[in-house]
Image (cartoon, rainbow, N blue to C red):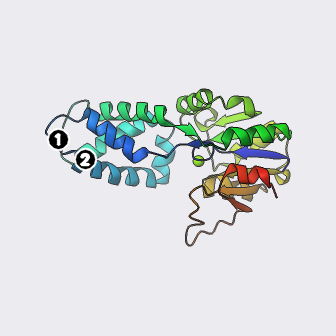
Amino acid sequence: MRALLLDLDDTLLDYSGGVDAHWEAAVAACAPPGLDRMKLLIALAETRRWFWDDPDRHRRERVNMLAAWRHIAEYALERTGVEADGLAEAIAHDFAARRRDAMRLFPDTVESLERLRRRGIPLALVTNGDASQQRDKIERHDLGRFFDVVLIEGEFGVGKPEEIVYRHALRALGAPPEEAWMAGDHLEFDVDAPQRLGLHGVWIDRAGHGLPAGSRVRPHRVVRSLRELVEAPG
Ligand SMILES: [Mg+2]
């Protein structure tokens, strides 16, 4: 491993932890009396799945997360037949604030990044999504100091799995693809797409569920944590 590209959300930062509870709390905080909260929560869960399952919508919406969360709340309210001015907006804001407060780095993140730095391995942070949200996460958790290059979809204008994203990061690190690795939780964005360019692809499977049935992606390595990769780079 002569250079390493790393994903942010659910790779270095526990992004998805507590999401259901945060929607529940946001609804409890914002819903007017008389609103059937359970019905709305069920509608929200269905809407979120539908909303993010469409790759085109995913790409369009993930660069403005506050708007995406408002759209999700609007669709869910529509599904439940509720009309309430400003309620979707209020729920989205409340949810965003709870998420921001709750997000933490995984326990092995800082230690692993420090070890990689000590070994002199050039590092790139390559993350999809909203420019202001991703920047805020990087600054709040003081991650910038570890990386030679930080590439955020919302700033760069293009996201994973577009080739130019990985090529740009590699150029910035001065590393040829065959000497570089990419590690992350997303099988397509962090493993398959970089492998097509000649990088080593490492899938971080923190939940330990293993590859989904029928997955055609074959990571060079599957690890349960970043620490596992750093301790034995292979
Ligand atoms: Mg991720």
Residue 221: horizontal and vertical position, in percent? 73, 61
Residue identifier under label 1: 35
100 with respect to 36 (left or right) = right
Q: Residues within 10 Å of mark 1 (few under 14, many from 20)?
A: few
Up/down of 130 relative to 7, above or below: above
As measured in the structure, the alpha-carbon distance from the residue carrying label 2 to the one carrying label 1 is 8 Å
The kind of residue tagged 1 is: Leu
Kind of element beneath mark 2: helix
The kind of residue tagged 2 is: Leu
Residue 92: horizontal and vertical position, in percent? 36, 34
Residue 2: horizontal and vertical position, in percent? 86, 47
For residue 40, the mark is 2
Residue 102: horizontal and vertical position, in percent? 48, 36
81 with respect to 13 (left or right) = left
Q: Is mark 2 within 8 Å of ligand 1?
A: no
Q: Looking at the image, tell me whether mark 2 or mark 1 is earlier in sequence order.
A: 1
Residue 141 figure quarter: top right
Badge 2 vs badge 1, beta-carbon distance below 8 Å: yes
- Given residues 23 and 175, the one toward you in this image is 23
The quarter of the picture where the C terminus appears is bottom right
Instruction: Name the residue located 66 percent from the left edge and 44 percent from the top edge.
Output: 108
Instruction: Name the residue located 34 percent from the left edge and 51 percent from the top edge.
Output: 45
Instruction: Name the residue located 56 percent from the left edge and 58 percent from the top edge.
Output: 207
